[in-house]
Amino acid sequence: MNQLKDKIAIITGVSRLKGIGAAICKELAETSYHIFFTYWTEYDKKMPWSIKLDEPLKLKEELMQKGVKVSCMELDLTEQDAPERLLISVVDQLGYPDILINNAAYSTNNDFSNLTAEVLDKHYMVNVRATTLLSGIFAQRFDKKSGGRIVNITSGQFQGPMPGELAYATTKGAVDALTITLSAELAPLGITVNAINPGPTDTGWMTEEIKTQLKPMFPFGRMGEPKDVAKTIKFLVSDEADWITGQIIHSEGGFKR
């Protein structure tokens, strides 16, 4: 796809080498996109999967070996000015971006009995506020006639309930609503807006017990892998997908709840 050459893609939430964000970066870099990614190690260190502090830099080196320009920055998207600082850094280091992948997410386990305002606010700040404001700033500064792409990562909140993940389900569900309305607003600017639900994906957080429980729900007989959603995104940001917008795509291998 030579038409992708010299285009710039932003991918947020790329801390772990096994994560979906890293897979997206690799897939797009192999298709000649220049890459700018963000990471937030303080968050990942507190999660069950943890993280080695050198993972983002290892990913940067791997991407550069593919012959594209690569920059990255540590960014806490709960900070109010984070979207503005991110766009400034991208423009300064690589140029004006063509693609925005809102992959970053804040997720903790909670339900109606223990959810606090502080925890809910953090989910909102990353999953809703940062995604919305970053998309808006990206669109305001998009200076081409067509070819702009925004892809949001959702989690199938309207496919079924997610007990024990009340804050995450609530805020991620808002991303679906954002995608549909924003797509109508940005179409006149030549920007498509879509969302992808990758379904349960083995990014290192699954125990063997979880895998045993989920595997029978996949008709293909295997778990979802990060590269699966990355390949879908590669298509959505290509010129071939310029007539697809406002869609919530369930790229989850026929997963049956």
Image (tube, rainbow, N blue to C red):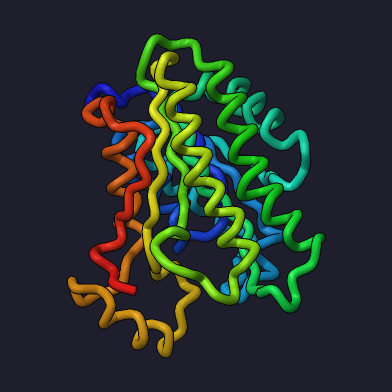
Kindly identify the residue that appears in the image at 73 percent across and 59 percent down. 120
Q: Residue furthest left?
A: 220
Q: Is residue 138 above or below residue 115?
A: above
Q: Is residue 9 visible?
A: no
Q: Total of numbered circles in the picture?
A: 0
Q: Is residue 140 above or below residue 79?
A: above
Left or right, 39 with reference to 6? right
Residue 202 vertical placement versus 28 (above, below): below
Instruction: Assign the C terminus to one quadrant of the image.
Output: bottom left
Q: Is residue 230 above or below residue 18?
A: above
Q: Residue visible at 50% across and 42% down?
A: 177
x and y, in percent, of residue 1 in the image:
21, 29
Identify the residue at horizontal 43%, vertical 58% (top origin).
158
Q: Nearer the viewer, residue 171 or 91?
A: 171
Taking depth in this image into account, of 236 and 91 the one nearest to the observer is 236
Q: Is residue 169 left or right of residue 114?
A: left
* Residue 142 in sight from this viewpoint: yes
Give residue 155's position: percent from left, percent from top. Answer: 45, 58
Can you give x and y, in whole percent of width and height, for residue 179 in the image?
47, 38
| Left or right: 57, with 27 as reference point | right
Q: Residue at x 63, y 73 (%)?
A: 109
Percent x, y for residue 244? Answer: 29, 32
The part of the image, by quadrant, that contains residue 250 is: bottom left
Q: Quadrant of residue 225?
A: bottom left
The residue lying toward the viewer, choosing from 192 and 57, is 192
Image quarter of residue 202: bottom left
